[in-house]
Amino acid sequence: MLNRIGYYCWAGPGTSRMIRVKYFNPRIDEQSLMTSYDYDYLARAKELFGITDFWATYSWGFSEKTEQEDRVFLIDRLDNFKRLGIKVHAYIQGPNLVYDEFPDKNWWARDEKDRLIPYYRGRRMCSIHNSDYVDYVVGKIQATYGLGFDGIFVDNIQHGQLGVPSQPGKLPFVFCGDFSAPARAEFRAATGTDIPDDFERDLELTRAYLDFRVNANTRYIACLAEAVHAGGMEFGTNFYDPKFDPKYIYAIDLEKKTAVQDYILFENHSLPSSDGKKNNSYIEHLIDERKIDKPVFVVSYRNGVGMAPQFDQVDLDNLYSEASKANFFVCLKGSEFTTKNVWHNLYLDDYGVPQTDRLLPRIEKERSLDVLFLALKIPAFRWVMKRYYNPLYRIAFEWKICFFMVKVVYDTTLK
């Protein structure tokens, strides 16, 4: 479907700052990031791509003082979008924040060994069981009332430590979720026992905790939705890639999450290829199987954030040709490209209007062929993951020499 076209584009001073927090000595085309909300850029993007909806940076998760300039940057440019009839969905970071920006806060999630839980370099996961944190996010949403946004988009919603994808029909064996004091108190009040620190010791208790985790995340999302809707705006979140069931990975219940949102946005690494090996047919099947009747946007990457140069014309033609026959809307990735090792937003100079009539073969891949499922059967791999998942995750994102591990994870779980 092409009657709505999204554009997913992070810009402004906060985006440059966040790239420097997350990555190692990055080279950034600052002009590209600082002009992506200018009228001329937006007008050209609309002329080329027919954009109707735009996801734009409002809050990356720095302190109020630090990111004040980021919010002003977007608010001062809102009229550019309005003049072109483009809806603006303001981006707010999910339950992770820049750790060093909040030295007096104790709202951080913990793993089963009482360690902080990393989310990329420089950021840590927050506990959605901590009322101070939840109040902080709700207050940030309420502060947007009347500013002129059409919607609020909360990114990266996951409950505590990310779950390792489990084999079909199996429970996770690596701890996931939140072992902080508020989370443990809430679980004990509900069940009379503590959160399991070993998921293989008592499977029934583990199952009870995993259900508790999903229910907690569902309540959190509903709380955010209520705050956004009270301000008369649309509410959406990142549903990630539904290649694997998100229940145990992120603690997401697709149906319950969909119920409180105004649209669904899937972000994946399935940029459609001309040979048909990559495509979004599995999302089409999911929409049909789940009978999803709300608008669905799909943002397709080639590789992970900052791991690929910008699209060529064929990529755009493939995206539009696929969407023209699909039951979802295309949402173009407009930022986080690295061409010749320079970070930049989408350069528009060399593009023409995307074709919508390319004939694309579609090869559907069985999940059982994924390398990760094979690795999960190896005892040594399971032993290492169970004991060292948290520190391995941290060094993958925080040690430059180990960044190849991030690509391995992306390649095995998101393609």
Image (tube, helix red, strand yellow):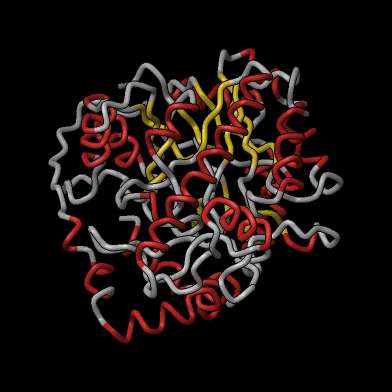
Give the residue displayed 65% in from the left and 54% down from the top. Answer: 127
Q: From the viewer's perspective, is residue 2 above or below residue 387?
A: above
Expressed as whole percent of the image width and height from the top left, the position of residue 304 reads 44, 57
| Residue plotted at (17% across, 46% down) | 276
Q: Is residue 120 visible?
A: no
Q: Which of the 4 image quadrants contains residue 167?
A: bottom left
Q: Position of residue 242 (x, y in %)?
A: 33, 46
Q: How many numbered marks have been drawn onto this rendered protein structure?
A: 0
Q: Position of residue 24 (x, y in %)?
A: 63, 69
| Closer-to-camera residue (202/30) | 202
User: Of residues 319 and 289, which is closer to you in this image?
Assistant: 289
Dividing the picture into quarters, in which one does residue 232 lie? top right
Q: Is residue 161 left or right of residue 142?
A: left
Q: In this orientation, does residue 390 appear? A: yes
In what quadrant of the picture does the C terminus appear? bottom left
Q: Is residue 227 above or below residue 187?
A: above
Residue at the far front: name it: 192
> Which residue is at a point 67% across and 56% down the rendered structure image?
182
Residue furthest to the bottom in view is 380
Residue 116 in picture, x, y percent from top left? 65, 69
At 68% across and 44% down in the image, what residue appears?
31
Would residue 80 appear left or right of 153 to someone viewing this image?
right
Left or right: 218 as drawn, with respect to 357:
right
Q: Nearer the viewer, residue 99 or 198?
A: 198
Figure quadrant of the N terminus: top left
